[in-house]
Structures are given as structure tokens and as C-alpha cells.
Amino acid sequence: MAQQRALLEVVELDARIVPSVTKGPALVHAALSSTGLHAAVTQAETSLSGTGSGTVSLSPAHVRGGGTLFVLRGTADLTGLGTFKVTGGVIDFKNGTSAGTLVFTGASGSITLVLTSSNQSGHFNYQISHSTIAGLSNSGTLTLALSGGHFNLTI
């Protein structure tokens, strides 16, 4: 794994001089105290973004509470993370809500998203329930369009 480094520059603030981040994934917070300069480094969270597509099929499985289970298989390109195989399913419940799980598996690791929607518009909120990739934002939105045996997703 390549080591990531933050690029620092010195900025003068009145009578104080403190380092600040100009680029890079880490945020540097610096504070002056009577004993000198103390800095803490934290990893910035990365939001998932990208697109994907693949096939969708109806599952004959019984859905508790009634509804239709759509099984998805395809690929996605996630910005900065690479290409992933996508598998999972989405249920459109009879009460008008939707929910599902998508698993993204690629060379950089795996990410499992739990999807929820208060309607069946294809717009989902997601939570990351598992990830082997550090530094990802825990939640976000995803759009899923199902048509003619195919799906397209945007995250």
C-alpha cells in the first residue's frame, strides 16, 4: 500500500505561524500552547461516487410482507477506488417502500451497502454495513434504475 503524505505550507496568522494543508487526504489541525506546537492528523472521509450497470432478474423467493425481489449482478466504477463487481438485491414491498443490499467487490476491497427508501422511486439512502476500505463516509444516496432486465446505478 502506498504511503500517503499531506503537503504542508506555513501560513502566518498575526504573530503565530502554523502549518496548514494545501492538498492531500489528511487534515492537519495545529494548536499553539505554552509548551510549543502540537498537531493531530486525522484521515479525511471519502464519499462514494461512480456509476454501474448490469442485469436484473426477478427472484421466485417468497418476500415476507409481500413484494417483489429484484436480483442484481453487474459492475461499477467507483471514483478513486477502481472497478467493482456488484451483486445484491432490492425488494419493492407492497406497502410502497423499498430496501436492499448491494455488495461491491474489487481489487481495492469490498463494500456492503444497506439501502432504504420510503417510496419506490429508485432513490435510496445507504449505510455502509461493512467495508475493508478505510476512510469512506458511512452514508449517502444512490439512484437505481431498473428497465428491461438491466439496471443502472449512480452513487
Image (spheres, grey):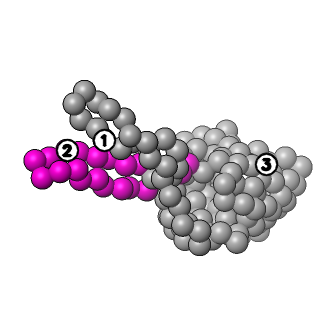
Label 1–label 3 contact, CB within 8 A: no
**Which one is in front in this view, the residue at disc 2 or the one at disc 3?**
2
Q: Is residue 31 magenta?
A: yes
Direction from residue 6 to residue 95 in the image, left or right: right
The kind of residue on which mark 3 rests is Asn
The kind of residue on which mark 2 rests is Leu
Label 1, label 3: how many angstroms apart (C-alpha)? 47 Å
The vertical placement of 40 against 147, above or below, is: below
Residue at 49% x, 41% y is 22
Q: Which mark is residue 67?
A: none
Label 1–label 2 contact, CB within 8 A: yes
Q: Please state which of residues 145 and 20 is positioned toward the viewer in this rendering.
A: 20
Direction from residue 122 to residue 129 in the image, left or right: left
Q: Quickly name the residue at label 1.
A: 18
- Magenta segment, which residues? 27-47
Across and down, in percent, residue 31 comes to: 23, 45
Judging from the image, what secondary structure is the residue with disc 2 in?
strand
Judging from the image, what secondary structure is the residue with disc 3 in?
strand
Residue at 44% x, 47% y is 8
Counting residues from the start of the chain, the first of labels 2 and 3 encountered is: 2
Q: Quickly name the residue at label 2.
A: 32
Q: Quickly name the residue at label 3.
A: 152
Counting residues from the start of the chain, the first of labels 1 and 3 encountered is: 1
- Mark 3 is surrounded, within 10 Å at the Cα level, by few (under 14), some (14 to 19) or many (20 or more) other residues, namely some
**Which one is in front in this view, the residue at disc 1 or the one at disc 3?**
1
Q: Please state which of residues 130 and 46 is positioned toward the viewer in this rendering.
A: 46
Q: Is residue 11 magenta?
A: no
- Mark 2 is surrounded, within 10 Å at the Cα level, by few (under 14), some (14 to 19) or many (20 or more) other residues, namely few
Q: Residue furthest top?
A: 14
Residue at 50% x, 58% y is 5
Across and down, in percent, residue 152 comes to: 79, 48
